[in-house]
Image (tube, rainbow, N blue to C red):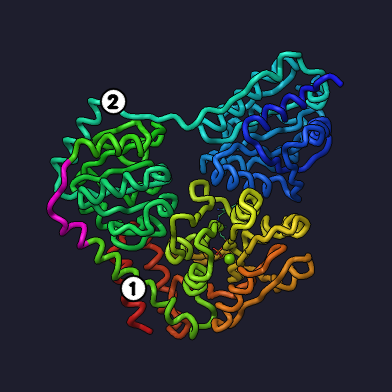
Amino acid sequence: MAQKVADVLWKMLAEAGVKRCYGIVGDALNPVIDALRRNGEIEFIHVRHEEYGVFAAVAEAYLTGNPVVVCGTAGPGVVHLFNGLMDARKEGAAVVAIAGDVETTLIDTAALEELNPYKFFDTACLYVGRVVNPEQVRAVVTTAIMTAVVDKGPTLISIPGDIAASNAPDRSAHGFSIPAEPMLRPADADLKKLAEMVEAANKVTIFGGDGCRDARNEVLQLAARLKAPIGYSFRGKQWLEHDNPNAVGMTGLLGYGGAYKAIHGADLLLMLGTDFPFSEFLPGDNVKKVQIDKNPKHIGRRTAVDLALVGDVKTTVTALLAKVSNKADGTFLERHVAETKSFEELLHHYVTKGPQIKPIRPEFLAATLSELADDDAMFFADTGTACIWLSRHVKGGTNRRIFGSFSWASMANAAPNAFGAQLAFPGRQTIAVCGDGGFTMLGLGDLLTQVQRKSPVVQIILNNESLDFVNIEQQEAGIVPFGVDFKNPNFAKVAEAMGAKGIRIEEPGDVRAGLAEALAHKGGPVVVDAVVDPYALSLPAHVPFHVAQSFTLSLAKQVLNGKMDSVIKTIERNIRLI
Ligand SMILES: Cc1ncc(C[n+]2csc(CCOP(=O)(O)OP(=O)(O)O)c2C)c(N)n1
Ligand SMILES: [Mg+2]
């Protein structure tokens, strides 16, 4: 049989290292999916909602570095991909979307399920190609894959059913290869300026992001030489925090430790591979700032910088190490490391008191989870309060990973992220900490997919019957919380009815055993329904309500306004109140 356009498509995707395609079939996609079946090299993962498939693909692509395919068909199914593709764009995941398209004879006739892919996906995708002639296939597919892999983001191939089923031109199938990550280094003149600035500064602080993922050793070496504290974004934490004597925690909305002060008290701030979005947490002109990033778009958009260097962190820091000398004075570093330790002790309060406090404190739940999980566990945080608890209480390690919708901040990412990670790394613990809002938004329907595939994903639901993060936001804005409460079923029973294992934890004394049972469960998904304190950020339960209210208001307001100093004090007082 002659090779069809869709055969060429899958052959090229398989050659590019694609292992899976997540999506829902139908209509215009039928000939595409028929070719996937014939090809046999790429596994099709039938999900119940296309968006769930994209979040799974984002985690797989981010964690493996391989491109991953998602698909949806004509109009509505394609629209369901959109939020996930935005996530891929912001998280930098190489996702290639295949969008079923109406027959070529119907294009631009307002046909049923017709969607203009260029207009619709312009915001989300780095490249959109529409294959309206078989001759285009090799060029369009090559561009979609290369752009996704090299520029790290989603691309989309829109393909009408009639074209997918057409014979491919003979030469279409020939040769395809993906380059390894190139090295990028700033010009010598810029490196010289950087070295001079570093040499001239007495107090240097490093603030690292996800761009440090391959550069941990180099960054730690630089910090040791400069006696520099290292702060990090949520995305940078997993690469820079563990086993690092210079670590000073995070700044920003989730901030803890000495990072905020170390960043503001420095003479020179080195921002390495970070697009940290919260400008209000970055210092003004009193601190000199250097930003190093391989993506020039990241540089200077959150804060004005004194020196902009385009280069990958590993190559640039390696080059810098050859040019800078040891700094003798370690007092700046010691001060901020000590501050970080005392902050951690304060934060630990709810962990140590955890077994006695009901409703269950999420801090205690997260810390116990961290203690029980494997050294190479992968954690996924839903957007919401899960990010606060995981960022503060889950300990990193060389092989531990933590991921979420950190840059796009969509709800409902964690369960599908964990599902995708489980498929890519079978046998490794994949743990999603989900909001009850997030889980019921997207996670619940596709729990059936996990059940069907016997995927051992552990999802822990923070059952606080509230959109708690928004509740905090609203109080911060000084408005009466509205539209944030809801009623939940017993998620453990729901999970059991769906064929998964369900564990309900209401008593703090049951947290350890419940989590241990969930982590030990093999052969299928687990849902832990953890009934947690919805006022966890505010106060212990026995403090009078009006105090609790104003406490929440002021704490949230201060965190959002970057006043970490007063937040530390507030937490101190909070603890004294107990
Ligand atoms: C798709 C989407 N809708 C709305 C929001 C705004 N939002 C951010 S966090 C949040 C609340 C999440 O609630 P839940 O999942 O229950 O987690 P909790 O904060 O209660 O732990 C909302 C509504 C969002 N980020 N994404
Ligand atoms: Mg909630």
Density class for disc 2 (Cα within 10 Å; few <14, some 14-19, many ≥20) is few
Residue 128: x and y in percent read: 63, 27
Q: Amino acid at mark 2?
A: Ala
Q: Is residue 258 above or below residue 149?
A: below
Q: Residue at x 39, y 33 (%)?
A: 294
Residue 533: x and y in percent read: 53, 75
User: In the figure, residue 54 lies in which quadrant?
Assistant: top right
Distance Cα–Cα, label 1 vs label 2: 44 Å
In magenta segment, residue 329: yes
Quadrant containing ligand 1 reads bottom right
Dot 1 corresponds to which residue?
345
Taking the image as shown, residue 22 lies to the left or right of residue 161, namely left
Dot 2 corresponds to which residue?
187
Residue 112 appears in the picture as rendered: no
Sooner in the amino-acid sequence: mark 1 or mark 2: 2
User: In the figure, residue 477 lies in which quadrant?
Assistant: bottom left
Q: Which residues are magenta?
A: 325-335
User: In the figure, residue 333 lies in which quadrant?
Assistant: bottom left
- Nearer to me, 439 or 467: 439
- Nearer to me, 322 or 405: 322
Q: Residue at x 80, y 31 (%)?
A: 35
- Name the image quarter holding the N terminus: top right
